[in-house]
Amino acid sequence: MTGPAVPFREIVLKVHSRCDLSCDHCYVYEHADQSWRTRPKTVSDQVISRTAQRLAEHAKTHALPSVSVILHGGEPLLAGPARLRRVCEEFGRALSGIADLDLRIHTNGLQLSPRYLDLFDEFDVKVGISLDGDRAANDRHRRFADGRSSHPLVLKAVELLRQERYRHLNLGLLCTVDIENDPHAVLDALVALDPPLIDFLLPHATWDEPPPRPDGSPTAYAEWLLAVFDRWQEQGGQVPVRLFSSVLSTLSGGPSLTESLGLAPTDLVVVETDGQLEQVDSLKSAYEGAAATGFDVFSHSFDDVAAHPGVRARQLGLAGVSETCRRCPVVRSCGGGLYTHRYRSANDFDNPSVYCADLEALVRGIQARTSATTVSPAVTGRSELAAEQHDLTRTLLAGLHEALGGRGGARWDEAWELAGVLESSPEGAAGLDRVVTHPYTRTWLLDALEGLHAGRPEAVARALRLPSYVAAAAVRSGLDIEVSADHRDGRLFLPTLGELRVAGPGESGRVRVRAVGDGFSVRRDGGGEQFVPEGAEGPDWLPVRHVTAGGTALFALDDLDPYRDCFEAPAAPRLDRAEAEAWSDAVGRAWKLLEQAAPQQAVDAAESLTTLTPLVAGRNTRRPHGHGAVGLMMTQDTEELALALLRSLRRTRLRALLDVTDLYALDGSWEYRLPWERNRAVSFSGLLADTFERVGLSFLVPGFTDGVPEALDMMERAAEPTVGGTRLLRSLREEMGGVHGTSGMNALMNPLDHEPAR
């Protein structure tokens, strides 16, 4: 096992080893490990004190900002208020000034009273209560030793915890699944108690002692939980359910929210009443001594336990699950199941979960029920993608305002206020949107934010380009608003409009910009005013030009923006008039060819492409930019330029999607052989990028479809795709159907009647 051990952020402290109930599904008393019989009933002062010291040492060593201590048993309330107060005081003192302390207690609730809750309120101890649903469900297992029902007393405890003075301590309800109970009745009973959270737990089982399946169904537990899920959705999901939230999170590329699912490493250790340090408690279901480490708080540190092979095995993530699980598409969500549930005496824990079929059915069932509402509309809608990209840029702008924290001074404040004025009118908002959505505005924002976060001295000055953006928006709006903006080296750059010489080289200062008629004026402090009419170009005014086709402007030919140098090849310097016309003519011809050979691709491009930046040969560091920009190198070969344009558009769209939604997770955990280049292995992201590009290019050159169906098959069977990624793969298959219905460029030209080398 390689890599450092994961520090413990959570400890379970057994404060009492006995219980006042006789639940027949309890892993502590009814399963393989019977070590409770030799434990002290109550945790001693020495164990409490030494455990608190060990935890403080551990938190300090690893600079942990917070740690959780869960008081457990047996039934922890049997320890009594005095003992529990001692625990709270000892841990509070030990962790003071080192880490925040999160205290919790998990109880059956029978002993809960105002006396306990007043104590918990004093130390902010959150309370979780075990309840298996309605009375019939709860009494199936949770009874007293003489067979009496515990349900009325548990309800009394829950109602006490719901009182206004104790409500803030309510951690929620823990419910162990029994498939013979009515799933709807169980959920309804739990929801009626208005808990902040419901936690459904599968009963502990192993391959040696499998869970009961009365009807023999291999997915009985999934069917039960999906019935609960359907009811939960019908009710609007009014109470969070951790199990469902975890599956939904991982399906969208997020983290697991529970130890029983997902691949997150374990960060929990158990301290028994005698000070023995053990692994997670559920291992007691596997075999006698399964949880033991041989360590105790008196002779060993938590770091010693973290290095224990049994603990490390549960910190390996994907590498710690069986080969069967590593090949399974739902492994990101189920994580191979709870470690205990994988046990088989023949080969220990190197197995899928005994609930494997249930977990797969549960994940797939939730995905099928929710994908329509959880997939970002941007995955399939270009206008939705543009809108989400716009929102992202505006969020970054707000983030820059916050990150400056007043350091921008009056210049920033004035520009920010004027942006608000523009926003208040339709014309002003449209002008501001035009500038904010310009792709290189995103590059400026990210550059300024990165500089501020890194503490670079020039970062504030870079952020103070905002007045130029607001001035450009004011000019575009046509509103009679004067905006002060900075010029550098004698030049005023107005994003999306152009660059004006206002002073000599090396000079810097401020000017006032105002829209005037069919143009704008620039007034310098101390006198002097320049008027720039719309459509002008001259030695002092360099406008942003446009690529045209058939007299129609298609998109900007931006060779001016100071943040345009963000592609794999360097941005070209300002083009002279003849070079610009040559670019416009060449791209116009390529565009016409695209319209003829792949009309739908041309329509899609027209909706998304706003900016083209000329590039020159060489290597460059790519930086993020907003949606709608491509960079191209000049070629007079129309077919080659059309392919380059379409390739750039596909790459830009995929990057834009990845900006706003997770399409995959755990990238790099598996490798895939490219069907069109067998000697090359790539990660999932590489396979997706290549496939996404080839599907688009195949509208021009059908040979690019070779190997694409195989690539889509591989990705659809893979574990990495999120729900959004799965929907994107489906849309690529739909696009492939469109390819076979078009003649492509093959019918228009012979030179490209082959698959170009990549």
Image (cartoon, rainbow, N blue to C red):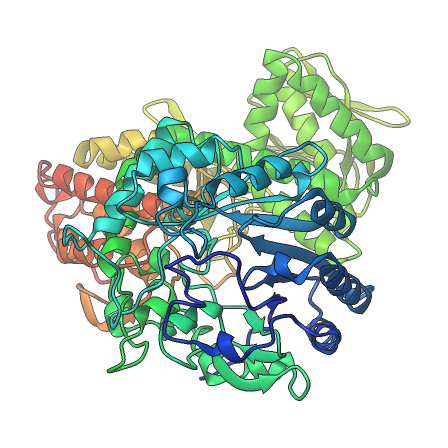
**Residue 80 rendering spot, x and y as whole percentages:** 69, 59
x and y, in percent, of residue 732 in the image: 22, 44
> Is 1 situated above or below 41?
below
> At x 62% / y 79%, what residue is drawn?
274
- Residue 171, compared with residue 499, is above or below; it is below
Q: Is residue 135 visible?
A: yes
Please say if 41 is above or below 556.
Answer: below
Does 266 sit left or right of 689 as displayed? Answer: right
Displayed quadrant of residue 606: top left
Q: Residue at x 44, y 57 (%)?
A: 145
Q: Give how far across and how far down residue 712 sits, in percent.
A: 20, 53
Looking at the picture, tell me which residue is in the foreground, 154 or 187: 154
Residue at position x 81%, y 28% in the image: 414
Q: Which residue is at the far right?
A: 526
Quadrant location of the C terminus in the rendered image: bottom left
Q: Could you say which is closer to the camera, residue 179 or residue 134?
A: 134
Quarter of the image with the N terminus in it: bottom left
726 on left or right of 290: left
Does the image show residue 371?
A: no
Q: Quadrant of residue 505?
A: top right
Q: Position of residue 201 (x, y in %)?
A: 40, 53
Q: Quadrant of residue 213?
A: bottom left
**Does residue 588 appear to the left or right of 157 in the view shown?**
left
Does 361 sit left or right of 492 as displayed? left
